[in-house]
Amino acid sequence: MTEKEILKKKIQLKSQALKLIRAERKEHIYRLALIGLKETLEIQIMTKFDSALSRKLDCVIYLLEH
């Protein structure tokens, strides 16, 4: 391979890595939001039990587990 081909390949690989890093970052942001929602729902349920809140909490827990 020539130096030019090597540099093109490195650029391509770096671009792929950036895409993966951005996707992983987005997943972390979503997970953080879900954890915050879970904590909020748990606090609300502690003050006053509501079956609708409980179902929402179950859904959030399911999303965090999968």
Image (cartoon, grey):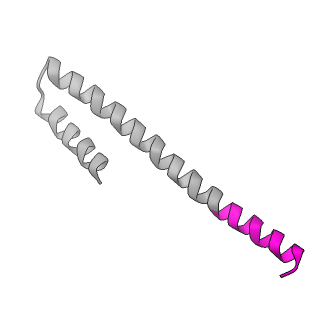
Residue 35 point in image, percent of width and height: 34, 35
What residue is rendered at 63% in x and 60% in y? 17
Residue 4 point in image, percent of width and height: 88, 74
Q: Give the quarter of the image for residue 38.
A: top left
Quarter of the picture containing the N terminus is bottom right
Task: Judge whether residue 30 is colored magenta.
Answer: no
Residue lying furthest bottom in this view? 1
State which region is magenta: 1-16
**Front-most of 63 and 3?**
3
**Front-most of 7 and 63?**
7
What residue is rendered at 58% in x and 51% in y? 22
Prevailing secondary structure of the magenta residues: helix
What residue is rendered at 51% in x and 47% in y? 26
**Is residue 45 positioned above or below 24 on the image?**
above
Task: Judge whether residue 8 is colored magenta.
Answer: yes
Task: Answer left or right for 25 relative to 15.
Answer: left
**Is residue 59 positioned above or below 36 on the image?**
below
Quarter of the picture containing the C terminus is bottom left
Task: Answer left or right for 58 relative to 17.
Answer: left
Residue 8 point in image, percent of width and height: 81, 71
What residue is rendered at 17% in x and 25% in y? 45
**Is residue 53 positioned above or below 30 on the image?**
above
Task: Answer left or right for 51 relative to 60.
Answer: left
**Front-most of 56 and 20?**
20
Residue 11 point in image, percent of width and height: 76, 65
Tally of numbered tags: 0
Q: Give the quarter of the image for residue 13.
A: bottom right
